């Protein structure tokens, strides 16, 4: 997935099952979702991280986002 992302902020905040560029090992839906870091806990963790970094993103120069 990261090959198609040009913006570093988007890359840091994107959530996908290939976060580590590996195939998932399989198992139950719950196991695959957890391994893919897409469970509610992982999503909430990323939402919090994104929200807490707001001031840092807001103070970055606009050219840094390109």
Image: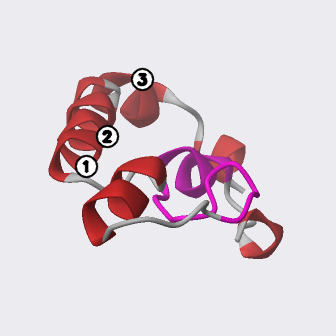
The circle drawn on residue 28 is none
In 3D space, how far apart are the residues under numbered discs 3 and 2 (Cα atoms)? 15 Å
Most extreme residue toward the front is: 27
Please rate how many residues cluster around mark 2, counting C-alpha atoms within 10 Å: few if below 14, some from 14 to 19, many from 20. Answer: some
Identity of the residue drawn at 70% across and 71% down: 1
Identity of the residue drawn at 25% across and 34% down: 45
In 3D space, how far apart are the residues under numbered discs 1 and 2 (Cα atoms)? 5 Å
Is tag 1's residue or tag 3's residue first in the polypeptide sequence? 1
The x and y percentages for residue 37 are: 41, 49
* Of labels 3 and 2, the one closer to you: 2
Please rate how many residues cluster around mark 3, counting C-alpha atoms within 10 Å: few if below 14, some from 14 to 19, many from 20. Answer: few
Residue 12, magenta (yes or no) = yes
Q: Magenta residues, as a range?
A: 8-23
- Closer to us: 43 or 57: 43
Residue 65, magenta (yes or no) = no
Identity of the residue drawn at 30% across and 71% down: 29
- Compared with 39, 16 (above or below) is below
Is tag 3's residue or tag 2's residue first in the polypeptide sequence? 2
- Magenta: main secondary structure equals loop
Please indicate whether residue 2 sits to the left or right of residue 52 in the image: right
Do the numbered discs 1 and 2 sit on residues whose CB atoms are within 8 Å? yes
Mark 3 element type: helix
The circle drawn on residue 56 is 3
Which residue is label 2 attached to?
A: 46
Which residue is label 1 attached to?
A: 43
Do the numbered discs 1 and 3 sit on residues whose CB atoms are within 8 Å? no
Identity of the residue drawn at 31% across and 29% down: 49
* Of labels 1 and 3, the one closer to you: 1
In the picture, residue 50 is in which quadrant?
A: top left
In the picture, residue 52 is in which quadrant?
A: top left
Most extreme residue toward the right is: 3
């Amino acid at each position: 997935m990261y090959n198609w992302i040009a913006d570093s902020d988007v890359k840091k905040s994107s959530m996908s099952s290939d976060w580590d560029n590996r195939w998932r090992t399989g198992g139950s839906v719950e196991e695959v979702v957890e391994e893919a870091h897409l469970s509610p806990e992982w999503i909430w963790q990323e939402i919090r991280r994104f929200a807490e970094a707001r001031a840092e993103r807001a103070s970055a120069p606009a050219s840094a986002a390109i």
